[in-house]
Structure formats: structure tokens, C-alpha cells
């Protein structure tokens, strides 16, 4: 739910399973494998890494997550698993003491607990988190439709032991 024909066409045009054998390739292509501070750092620009990721894809994912939030609000929140992810992530960061880097208005980068970052920083993080999961699920579904193997990316990564089922997030195929 929340992904229409235009978004589907954009994703189909931007993403290529032949170049992305694993879900993490989709995540990296979008630039979600790095924080915004790392993605836009002067060091990355000077090293030739550039800004990291496809800005148009990130914008498309941001708009898609926004559409899902609006549709969920209209429909009482039913059927939009990614909106649930957004809310869960936001609730987690609102109280977390985990240290993160945040760029202040004067350009300095400080390390502070999540709960002390700006509301916008926490909101953007929750969108990034849900968008990453969406891309992981997209890779799994697309691979299955084309009869390709797809690894359950989340399982075994960074201490995770579960495997997300895209059907739990409204996917049908």
C-alpha cells in the first residue's frame, strides 16, 4: 500500500537486479549505507567517493514514506507496516541514550544522545530506517518474481536474528 504506478516505474528504472545481487546493494545505491554526515563530508568529496547514493532514489523513497503516512492517517493506520516501523523507530530514538553525530546550525558536528537531537533529525532517521527496510523487501519480492535467489539480508547482520516477511508489510505477489 502507498506505492502507485509512478513510483513503481521510477524504482524499476533506477534499480537493476543484475547489478544488485543482494538487498544491501539497493540500500547502498540509495546512499542509506552511510549517515548524512558521512555522505556529505568534505573528505568523501575529496576522496572521489562523491556524495554517496542516488539522490533521486532517496527523494522518491522519502516521498513514498510520506504518502504511506498520509494514507495511514486517513485509514486509521491499517495496512501500512512501514508506518508502524516509522513510529517504532521514532519512539526508540526519542528516549535513546545512544550517541550519534549531529551537525549544528553553525556547521560544527557534535556527538550527543539520540534523545537530545532535534525532532527533525529523529524524524528523518525514522524515514531512512523504514525506506531501507522497504528497499530490502523490494529486493526480496523482485528476486522471487524473477526466480532469483535472495538472501534474507536482515538475518545475521549486526546481531539480528529475525527475518522480515514482506507480506507482513502489505506486499502481495
Image (spheres, rainbow, N blue to C red):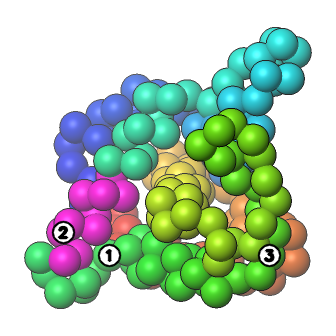
| Residue at the image point whose x is 48% and y is 60% from the top | 120
* Rendering quarter of residue 167: bottom left
Confirm or deny contact between disc 3 and disc 1 (CB under 8 A): no
Viewer-proximal residue among 130 and 154: 130
Which span of residues is magenta-colored? 64-73
Q: Measure how far apart labels 2 and 1 are at the Cα level.
A: 8 Å
2 or 3: mark nearer the eye: 3
Residue denoted by label 2: 71
Residue denoted by label 1: 80
Would you say the magenta stretch is mainly helix, strand or loop?
helix
3 or 1: mark nearer the eye: 3
Residue denoted by label 3: 98
In the rendered structure, the answer to whether residue 165 lies left or right of residue 173 reads right
Q: Is residue 79 above or below residue 136?
A: below
Tell me residue 33's x, y (percent): 72, 46
| 44 magenta-colored | no
Q: Is residue 149 visible?
A: no
Label whose residue precedes the other's in the sequence (2 or 3): 2
Amino acid at each position: 500500500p502507498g506505492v502507485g504506478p509512478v513510483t513503481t516505474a521510477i524504482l524499476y528504472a533506477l534499480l537493476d537486479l543484475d547489478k544488485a545481487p543482494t538487498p544491501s546493494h539497493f540500500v547502498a545505491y540509495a546512499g542509506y549505507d552511510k549517515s548524512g554526515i558521512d555522505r556529505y563530508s568534505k573528505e568523501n568529496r575529496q576522496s572521489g567517493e562523491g556524495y554517496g547514493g542516488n539522490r533521486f532514489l532517496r527523494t522518491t523513497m522519502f516521498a513514498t514514506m510520506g504518502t504511506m503516512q498520509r494514507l495511514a492517517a486517513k485509514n486509521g493506520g491499517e495496512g501500512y507496516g512501514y508506518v508502524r516501523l516509522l513510529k517504532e523507530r521514532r519512539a526508540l530514538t526519542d528516549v535513546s541514550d545512544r550517541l550519534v553525530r549531529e551537525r549544528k546550525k553553525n556547521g560544527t558536528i557534535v556527538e550527543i544522545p539520540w534523545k537530545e537531537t532535534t525532532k527533525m533529525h529523529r524524524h528523518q532517521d525514522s524515514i531512512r530506517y523504514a525506506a531501507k527496510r522497504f528497499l530490502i523487501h523490494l529486493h526480496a519480492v523482485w528476486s522471487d518474481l524473477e526466480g532469483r535467489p535472495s538472501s534474507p539480508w536482515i538475518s545475521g547482520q549486526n546481531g539480528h536474528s529475525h527475518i522480515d516477511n514482506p507480506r507482513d508489510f502489505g506486499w502481495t505477489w
